Amino acid sequence: MKLWHCGGARSLRPLWTLEELGLDYELEVLPFPPRVMQPDYLKVNSLGTVPYFVDGDTVMTESVGICQYLVDRYEDRGLGLRPEHPDYGAYLNWLHHSDATLTFPQTIALRYYFFEPDPAKRAVADDYAKWFRARLRRLDECLERQAYLVAERFTVADIAIGYALYLGQMLHLDKYYKPATADYLQRLMARPGFQRANAQAEPLVLPDVV
């Protein structure tokens, strides 16, 4: 297996999953954003995005999809849930919620706060940052009741959501996290699997403009 990765990017999700599963893989670390900083990468992935993942004939570009693929395709070490599990619906919902609802608005804020900081577009970044903060409500409610999202244990749903919270920390949006959510993120970041994955590339360091 081979994964293309940038520090702090969504590719951290599958990299963290690989580390938690103890699977063998090859890693190629790129500068961020790779389509700008390393244009030859477009010959590998025409989207110019990370993650890009290859496992034999399987090629994938969606971070959460790769996490689910890894636990479904290989021994999951308790990180996945099967369809017959009573929490399976919630598990899938959190996996998709992580990117579609939480990470998407962050990427817009990241773009207009830091990579295209046009004062005329500042209001767009502010709106999407507020969107992210508002969409934390359901997560906050869940974490006030339980330590992990589903099945009373750590799963790739926590990796998927945990990355969104970690990106929020890089964007300095963690100042708005409720105590249970902030504690959850710190517990996830204390896991050896996260620390090994995160140490393989320099994370994004962004000024506090929010």
Image (cartoon, helix red, strand yellow):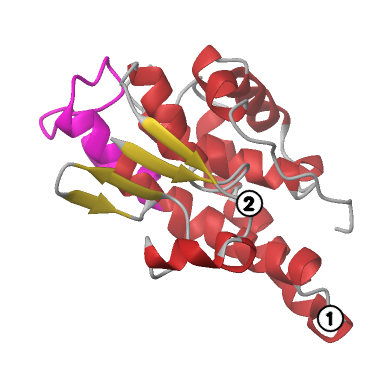
Residue picked out by circle 1: 118
Residue 152 percent across, percent down from the top left: 37, 17
Is residue 48 something that shows in the picture? no
Of circles 1 and 2, which is in front? 2
* Residue 119 x, y percent position in the rendering: 88, 81
Q: Quadrant of the C terminus?
A: bottom right
Tag 2: residue type? Answer: Pro
**Horizontally, is 44 left or right of 170 in the view?**
left
Whether 200 is drawn above or below 174: the answer is: above
Packing grade of label 2 (10 A; few <14, some 14-19, many >=20) is some
* Residue 178 versus residue 109 in the image, above or below: above
Q: Choose between 16 and 78: the one closer to the eye.
A: 16
Q: Is residue 11 above or below residue 17?
A: below
Q: Is disc 1 surrounded by few (<14), some (14 to 19) or many (20+) residues within 10 Å?
A: few
Picture quadrant where residue 15 is located? top left
Q: Residue at x 60, y 25 (%)?
A: 184
Is residue 122 visible in the rendered image? The answer is yes
Residue bounds of the magenta highlight? 67-96
Residue beneath the point at 64% across and 62% down: 37
Amino acid tagged 1? Asp
Compare residues 55 and 178 and report the one nearer the observer. Answer: 55
Determine the secondary structure under disc 2.
Answer: loop
Q: Is residue 99 magenta?
A: no
Q: Quadrant of residue 177?
A: top right
- Across and down, in percent, residue 97 comes to 42, 51
Instruction: Pick whichever, 49 or 79, lies toward us.
Output: 49
Which circle's residue, 1 or 2, is located before the other in the chain?
Answer: 2
